[in-house]
Every structure is written in structure tokens, then in C-alpha cells.
Image (spheres, helix red, strand yellow):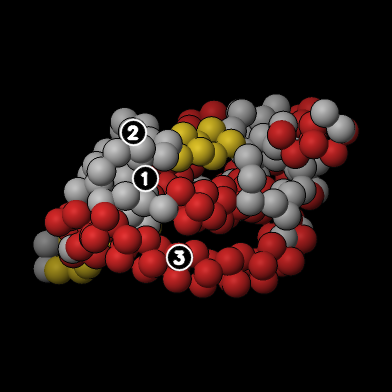
Amino acid sequence: MTAPETVLASYPVHFHVDYPDRELNRLTTAFRILVAIPALILLESVSGGSFSRSQGGDVAWGAGGLLFLGPLLMIVFRQKYPRWWFDWNLELQRFGARVAVFVALMDDRYPSTDDAQSVHLDYPYPDAEHDLNRWLPLVKWFLAIPHYVVLAFLGFAAFVAVVVAWFVIVFTGRYPRGVFDFVEGVLRWTQRVFGYAFLLVTDEYPPFRLAA
């Protein structure tokens, strides 16, 4: 194995979806966008906060969300990444990935809030003092701009690929393996960029690569 391949293979953010080597449920696939609505609502409820005011006071119907500014400030000023903040971000991303995989027709099992199912997302807890540059989090979002541009095109291509897969699954019950690998690669690339620029779990620049 060459040195560049070794670097790519060891990128800290790991993402993989088990290929469903079986016949998928055609009925739930046909109506996936409707079937997924409860999961999307649940994901939204833990991905952000919203409040309503009444005579009895303020009521929160949604809470949580990605923790970005807090970890950034802690890394910059204290060179520390609180473990429970890291765990929250990781589990939120895992749940979001399961919902994305379900919407993308890659699994016909309803997204679980805690079980990994067919989606495997992981990245190591960073030692902020030794593994992370304390000033880099201030500019990571900017350094990742080339990835945003590429992912905009890849995201559109993945959408078209999922539409094609929808027709194939409805008529055959099988997810075309080549299409599956492409959509998985786009999701993997997205997770790497997100881990670098917003979750701040690594300083290693994401590779321009779909493969694991």
C-alpha cells in the first residue's frame, strides 16, 4: 500500500452503509417520502430549538441541535473538547445519517433513535490539547469551501441516482449496487467535511474522494 492510500484509508471520520443484499419492501419504497415524514419531524425536533409564547409562559417544542460555537470557543480558549458535547454531536449525526439513508432508499427499516442498524458512523474523541490546533477551528469552515462546491454537484447527482433507484426498486425490489455505492460515497464525503469543518473532531483535511 502506498503512502497516499494509507493516509486516505486512515481518515478519522468513518462512514459505511451495509448493502441490502435482499429484496427491499416495494410498498414502503414507493411511498418513502410520506413514510419518512415522522422520522424527519423527530430529527428536526432534536436538530434545533423553537419556542412559542403564551400567557402561561414560554414553551419549547424543539431543543438541541448541533453544538458548534461552544466546542469552537472551548478549543480556542481552553484547548478542550467536552466529552458530553462530543457524544451529543456524534449521536445526533448518527441519527441524522440513518434518516438520510432511509430517505435515500438504502434501507427499508425505519430509522432507529439509538440502534446503528445498517449505518456505521464513527470518529475518535480528539485530545484537543495535542491533536487539534487551537486556532484552526476559526477558519475550517472557510478552508472547506472547495468541498462545498463539489458536494453541490455531487448532491444533485445523488438525488438523480436515488430517483433512478426508486424506479428500479419498485419494479425489481433490488437497489442497483453501483448506484448504492455512489450515494454512499456522497454521504461519506459529506460526513467527512462536516466532521472537519463543523464538528471540529479532526484537523486532517478531508480527501476529495468517494471511497472509504
Q: Spatial distance from mark 3 to mark 1, Cα to Cα?
A: 18 Å
Residue denoted by label 3: 161
Q: Spatial distance from mark 2 to mark 3, Cα to Cα?
A: 23 Å
Q: Spatial distance from mark 1 to mark 2, Cα to Cα?
A: 8 Å
- Name the mark nearer the viewer: 2 or 3: 3
Residue at (73, 55) in percent of width and height: 208
- Residue 198: % across, % down: 61, 52
Q: Are marks 3 and 1 in contact (CB under 8 Å)?
A: no
- Name the mark nearer the viewer: 3 or 1: 3
Residue sitting nearer the eye, 203 or 136: 203
Q: Which mark is residue 98?
A: 1
Residue sitting nearer the eye, 124 or 210: 210
Q: Quadrant of the C terminus?
A: top right
Q: Which mark is residue 117?
A: 2
Amino acid type shown at disc 3 = Ala
Q: Which mark is residue 122?
A: none
Residue at (33, 54) in percent of width and height: 105
Amino acid type shown at disc 2 = Gln
- In the displayed orientation, state which residue is furthest to the front: 172
- Residue 79: % across, % down: 73, 35
Looking at the image, is 197 positioned above or below residue 86? below
User: Going by the image, does 102 lie left or right of 80?
Assistant: left
* First in sequence: mark 3 vs mark 1: 1
Q: Are marks 1 and 2 in contact (CB under 8 Å)?
A: yes
Disc 1 packing (10 Å; few <14; some 14–19; many ≥20): many
